Image: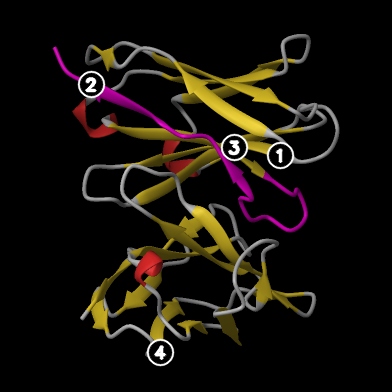
Amino acid sequence: DIVLTQSPASLAVSLGQRATISCRASESVDSYGNSFMHWYQQKPGQPPKLLIYRASNLESGIPARFSGSGSRTDFTLTINPVEADDVATYYCQQSNEDPYTFGGGTKLEIK
Amino acid sequence: DVQLQESGPGLVKPSQSLSLTCTVTGYSITSDYAWNWIRQFPGNKLEWMGYISYSGSTSYNPSLKSRISITRDTSKNQFFLQLNSVTTEDTATYYCARQPLRLRYFDVWGAGTTVTVSS
C-alpha cells in the first residue's frame, strides 16, 4: 500500500497568514501525466469535504484561498490567507494505486 | 443536488455481520460514477473499504477482501455494505461517498453513521 505521511500533525496560524501542509507519498502517485493526489477538509461532526483534486485543481465552490501543488511523491496544500472558518483537520488521499489511502491528517488551529 | 445517506444498526455484536445501506437521491447509481464505503476509526484514521461501480463491478481493499461485500438495489437507488465476522476493531464511523470512476476522488459524502462493535 502507498503510505501518505502528512506534516505537521498540527499547526497554529494567525488570521490572515499562510498555512502550508505537506503530504509525502511512499511512492509516486503520478500516472498518465496526472497526479492522483487529493485534499479534503474535515470539521468536527462532519464528513470530509473535497478541496483539491489531482494535486492542483480547485473543486467547485471552494475559495481560491486554497491551492495545491506538487507531483510524484511530494505535495502541498496552501491556505492563504487563513480565515477563522478554516479551523479543521486536513487530509491528503491518493488514488493512483489500489487500495486508495489517506494521510494521517493535519489539524489547523488559529494562533 | 445529489445526496447520500447512510443507515443501519449502531451496535453490532462481535463475530456478527455489519450491514449498512446508502440511499442516493438526485442521481442514479447506474449513471456513471463509483459508489464507495469509507470508514473513520476513533482517532480519525480514514480507510477506503471498496466500491461498486455504475455497471455493478466491485473493488475492495485487500485488507478486507475476505469479509466485505458491496451490493446494490438499482430499483431503490441504494447500495449496501456487508462486513462479516466483525471485531471491536471495526468500531468506526462509516461513510458512503461518490467517486468519478476515472478521476478517483470522493466528491460527495454522506453524513456518516457510527457503528460500535460490542457485546
Q: Calculate the distance from the C-alpha at mark 1 to the C-alpha at mark 4.
A: 35 Å
Callout 2 environment at 10 Å: few (<14), some (14 to 19), or many (20+)?
A: many
Marks 3 and 4: in contact by CB < 8 Å?
no
Q: Calculate the distance from the C-alpha at mark 2 to the C-alpha at mark 3.
A: 21 Å
- Amino acid identity at mark 3: Asn
- Amino acid identity at mark 2: Val
Please tell me whether residue B115 belongs to the stretch shown in magenta: yes
Residue at the left extreme, as displayed: B119
| Tags 4 and 3 both on a single chain | no
Judged from the image, the secondary structure of the residue bearing numbered disc 2 is: strand
Residue that badge 2 annotates = B117
Q: In the drawing, does residue B96 fall left or right of residue A17?
A: right
Residue B90 in the image: x percent, y percent?
Answer: 29, 31
Marks 3 and 1: in contact by CB < 8 Å?
yes
Residue at the right extreme, as displayed: B31
4 or 2: mark nearer the eye: 4
Q: Calculate the distance from the C-alpha at mark 4 to the C-alpha at mark 2.
A: 41 Å
Residue A73 in the image: x percent, y percent?
Answer: 52, 83
**What mark, if any, has residue A18 been given in the picture?**
4
Give the residue at x 28% y 80%: A8
The residue range painted magenta reads B99-119
| Tags 1 and 3 both on a single chain | yes
Give the residue at x 31% y 11%: B16
**What mark, if any, has residue B36 been given in the picture?**
3
Q: Which comes before the other along the chain, label 2 or label 3?
A: 3
Please tell me whether residue A1 belongs to the stretch shown in magenta: no
Residue that badge 1 annotates = B34
Q: Calculate the distance from the C-alpha at mark 1 to the C-alpha at mark 2.
A: 27 Å
Q: Nearer the viewer, residue B84 or A41?
A: A41
Q: Which comes before the other along the chain, label 1 or label 2?
A: 1
Residue A106 in the image: x percent, y percent?
Answer: 32, 70
Marks 3 and 2: in contact by CB < 8 Å?
no
